[in-house]
Image (cartoon, rainbow, N blue to C red):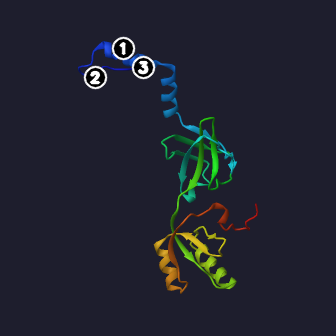
Amino acid sequence: MVRLVDGQSSREESQLRDRLDHPLNLFLLTMMHQPIEISAALGRGLEVGQRSVDVLEVEWHETAKSRLRRKTVGGQQVLINRADRGTFQDGDVLYLSEEMAILLRIKPCDCIVLRPNSLQEVGTLCFEIGNKHVPIFMTDEQEVCVAYDGYLYQMLQSGNFFPTIEERVLYPYQMVKAYGNIA
């Protein structure tokens, strides 16, 4: 319903209503307010062609959430509503239409990075960090990474582990699982 603003004539109101009631404008207004529902990732590395690409940025810990409502970088509302227990990966294509593609990007965060010198040091590190119930990530460069936590950083420093703080992306496939990283 269109309402008159002080000083606006009923003729102006009628013209405004006609523009808003146009089918294309109603469709665009609906698309702006209706979120795009996503129930699963369509895949990674899909060809998007000439479509405009929008990006949904999430934190590393949000990749496994089954329900999430966010706006893309371009301002499109997205509602993730998944039934499965999987995780999204960086670069997943979440939505594909004739005009647009929405890709997932995991935001970088401050991380504690450790470079162990032996397998025994890896075991000790993972034991100490695991006691804090913090997810552990192993990179391809054999580095141990965890999301930054001040108390944990001080504990690792006092234990002579030589941690550094770096901005990294924590990829879900790098997370160490309790029963192995079996796909």
Return the residue at label 3.
Answer: 19
Q: Which residue lies furthest to the left in this view?
A: 7
Going 33% across and 20% down the picture, which residue do you hit?
Answer: 3
Return the residue at label 2.
Answer: 5
Element under label 3?
Answer: helix
Please name which of the two marks, 2 or 1, marks the residue nearer to the observer. 1
User: On screen, 98 above or below 156?
Assistant: above
Going 56% across and 63% down the picture, which residue do you hit?
Answer: 169
Element under label 1?
Answer: helix
Ranked by sequence position, the earlier of labels 2 and 3 is 2
Going 63% across and 36% down the picture, which residue do you hit?
Answer: 97
Going by the numbered disc 1, the residue's amino acid type is Ser
Residue 150 is situated, as x and y percent measured from the top left of the image, at: 46, 73
Q: Distance between the residues labelled 2 and 3?
A: 17 Å
Q: In which quarter of the image is the N terminus?
A: top left
Return the residue at label 1.
Answer: 14
Residue 155 is situated, as x and y percent measured from the top left of the image, at: 50, 80
Q: Quadrant of the C terminus?
A: bottom right
